[in-house]
Amino acid sequence: MGSLYFLVTLLLIAAPSCSGFSITGERHERSLEEDGEDWTRSQQEAANLSATINEILDSYDRKLRPNAGGEPVEVTVEVKVVAFGELNEASMEYSMDIFFRQWWYDPRFRHNSSTPFNMAADPRMLFWTPDTYFFNVKRIKYHFVTRENMRVMIHSTGKIYFSARITLTAQCDMDFRLYPMDTQHCPLIIESYAHTTDDVDYKWRKTKANKGKGIEIVSKEMAQFELVGIETKFKDTENSKGSFASLSVIFSFRRRMEYFVSTVFSPGVTLVVLSWCCFWISRDAVPARVSLGITIILTAIVLCGSVNQEMPPISYSKAQDYFLLVSFGFIFLSFLELVIVLNTDPDPRWLRWLKRCCKVKYEKEEKQPLNLEEAVLEKENSSSTEPDTELEADITHPHETGLALVNSHVRPCNRTLPRRVVVSNGDQGATVMLLDKLGEMRHGKIQVKTTNQDAPKKRKTCGPHWVDIISRIIFPASYVAFLVLFWRTYVQQLPL
C-alpha cells in the first residue's frame, strides 16, 4: 500500500513537466493550435511577400537606376577580409579573399511586410545593382560552391543589401629600395564603371565591427608579411567622361625580417669574418691563404646571385644589395691584402725607426755572466760561508780545452788570495772550487760556461707582417662601423 501511494505521487509530480502530456489534455491542444496559427501566418506572409516582389519585378526596368533623373543613389560599401594571399614581388601584385557588401535604397521595392525578403541568388539579372568595379584588380573570381555565394535582402523601406564572396588579385606598385626592411602600401580602389557622381555616389560603412574604417579583418596572418596599417579614403576622380566617386583602402604590409637574417645577413657577416682569418695565418703559408680566400670569394658570389632570383630586374639598388656588395668588397680586399704582404718588405726602415722612437719592441736583457777573475774575487769577499752557493762565470775557450788552460784563468787570482782554488773541466763546462788552507771548501763553487761555444741552431720563424698587423685592426673596425651605419640608415628607421 505504501509503495503504491509513492508511485502515484511521483507520477503526479512528473506529469506536468512532460512535453505533450497533460492530465486534462487542454494545454497541449491549445499549444499546437497556436503554433499552427503562427506557422500558417508566416507561410502566408512569405507567400504574399514573394508575390509582391514578383509583381514588382514584372514591371521593373533594371536598366534604370533608382531615382532616375533625380538624386544620385548613395551606395554604402563594406569590405570584410577573410584572408590575405601572397604578395608577389616579381609581378607586383597581391591577393585576398573578401566579402564585398553594398547597401542602397530602391523605392520601387517598398512593401508592407514586417520581415525583409531574403534570398541566396545572383541579383544582377533580376534588378538594378550598382556597377561597382575594382580599378586596380587584375583577376577576380566569384564563388559558386555549392551555389552562388551571394546574399540579397530587401527591406520594407526599399533598402537593399547585397553581399558576395570574391577572391581577387590586385596590382600593387612596390618600392624595393629598403628591401628586405621594406613596408609595401597596396591599394584597393572601388569606383562606378559607368555612372558619374550625378547618378551614383559611394561612401564607407563605418561600424564598431570595422572600427569606423569600413574594413573588417578576419585573419591578418601572412607568411612573409604582417599587416601594420589600414587607411580608407574617399575622393572624386576626374577624367574626360566626368567625375566618378572613388573609394580606396590602403593596406600596409611590413616584411618579416627573421627569414632574411638567417639566410642573407648572417651568412654574409660570417663570410667576412672568415676572410679575416688569413691575417693570422703565417705569410709563408701562401697555399693556405690563397685557397681560403678564393673559397670565400666564390661562396660570396653564389650568395649574391641566389638572393635575387625571385626579385624583378629593377633598375635601382636595394638595401640588401648594398649590404652584400660592401661585404663582398671586404672579402675581396682581404684577398688583395695577401698580394700586398707578399710584395712588400716585412720590416722596412721606417718601421724600424718607428719602433725605436715609440719603443714598441722591448727585448729582455739577459744577465751577462762575470768573467772568472771577477767571480773568484766576489766569492772570496763574500760573507757567505755556505758551501753550496754557486756563481756563474765565463771563460773564452771551448770546453774541449785542457785543464791547464782553464787553470790559467784562475792563477792571477790565486796569487793574491790566501785560499787555494781547484779547477775541474768537463763537457758541460768548468767548475772552480775555493778551498781554505786546511783543504775544506769555502764560499761554494763557481760554474764556468764557455762563451765562444756554438749555440744550438733554432728553427727560423718569421714574425707577422706589418700589413697583417694593421689589417687585424682596420678591417674589423671598418666593417663594424659599416654595420652600425647600415642599421641606423635602414633598420632603425622602420615604422613601428
Image (cartoon, rainbow, N blue to C red):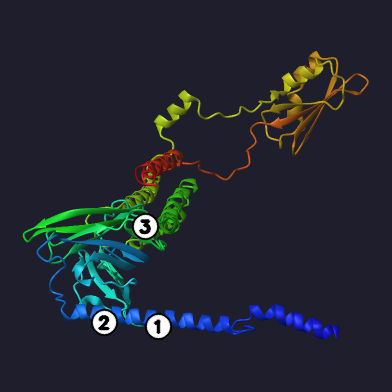
Considering depth in this image, is 29 or 171 the residue closer to the camera? 29
Q: Label 2: state its secondary structure.
A: helix
Reading the image, the residue beneath label 1 is 40
Q: Quadrant of residue 420?
A: top right
User: Answer yes or no: do the residues labelled 2 and 1 have beta carbons within 8 Å?
Assistant: no
Measured from the top left, where is residue 28 in percent x and y?
56, 82
Mark 3 belongs to which amino acid? Answer: Asn
Reading the image, the residue beneath label 3 is 210
Q: Quadrant of residue 116?
A: bottom left
In whole angstroms, how far apart are the C-alphas of marks 2 and 3?
A: 36 Å
Which numbered disc, 2 or 1, marks the residue closer to the eye? 1
In whole angstroms, how far apart are the C-alphas of marks 3 and 1?
A: 39 Å
Q: In the image, is residue 167 above or below residue 2?
A: above
Q: Quadrant of residue 412?
A: top right
How many residues crowd around disc 2 within 10 Å: few (fewer than 14), some, or many (20 or more)? few
Mark 1 belongs to which amino acid? Answer: Thr
Measured from the top left, where is residue 401 in percent x and y?
71, 34
Considering depth in this image, is 415 or 148 the residue closer to the camera? 148
Considering depth in this image, is 141 or 236 the residue closer to the camera? 236
Considering depth in this image, is 248 or 125 the residue closer to the camera? 125
